[in-house]
Every structure is written in C-alpha cells, then in structure tokens.
Image (cartoon, helix red, strand yellow):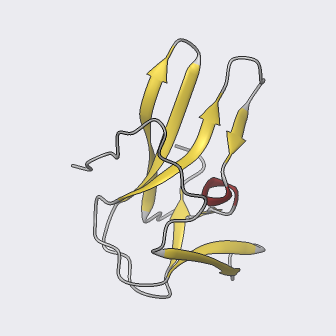
Amino acid sequence: MARLRYDRFYYNPLPEEVTLDNSDIDGIGVFALQGIEEAMDLGSTHIKVPMIAGFIRTPLGGFLNHSEEPNCCLVLSQDWDDYKVYNLITLERIERGEELTLDYNL
C-alpha cells in the first residue's frame, strides 16, 4: 500500500525522480530519471478547487500519457468540502528511462 505524503503545503512541480521528454505515446511525457519503487507517492497531479469547474493539473499531472497497461494510478490524498487533491502513485517498479503512464478510463 502506498504511503501518501501528508503535508498540505508540500508541492513540487516535478519530483527529482522524473523529467519531461518526448514521448512515443503522444507529445511530451513523464520519464523516470532513476529506478522508482512500487507504491511510491510522486506528488500532486490534479487539484479540484470549488470555484473552478474541473481540475487544475500540476506540471506532473499535465504530461502523463494514457496506457491500457498503466504503471501508475491516481489516489485521492486530500478531501475536504469541495477541495480535492490527487497524487500519483506507482503501481510497479519503474526503471530508469521508462515513461510513467495512467489509464485515463479509470
């Protein structure tokens, strides 16, 4: 089970473990700079704020590409009133140079 980083003031546009690069899937993607362990919380990706219809995507959340066989998922890390924060959690070990992906349909 993933251990979420619980600090509502924690924010890092891109964790030190990843970088942005050209993707074979679509446009730009998020890639591992080093091996990343399973169940690692890489930080906030999507934020729902009451006065905005929809979600704000962080730099990390803005470049995650879709895969039918994702290696990451989103987990609700904070939820109060209509304010919600989703964090990116790895589903498996991700090797250096591998693209991080989500299943958009889940």
Which one is in front, 41 or 72? 41
As drawn, the residue found furthest toward the bottom would be 97
* Residue name at image x 31 percent, y 73 percent: 93
Give the residue furthest to the front: 9
Above or below for 78 versus 46: above
> Which picture quadrant has residue 94?
bottom left
Q: Hey, which quadrant is residue 99 in on the image?
A: bottom right
Q: Is residue 26 left or right of residue 36?
A: right
Q: Residue at x 67, y 25 (%)?
A: 49
Tell me: residue 9, above or below residue 53: below
Residue 83 coordinates in the image, percent (x, y): 57, 22
Q: Is residue 26 above or below residue 7?
A: below
In the foreground, 69 or 17: 17
Q: Quadrant of residue 65?
A: bottom right
- Given residues 37 and 15, the one toward you in this image is 15
Coordinates of residue 47 in the picture (x, y in percent): 61, 36
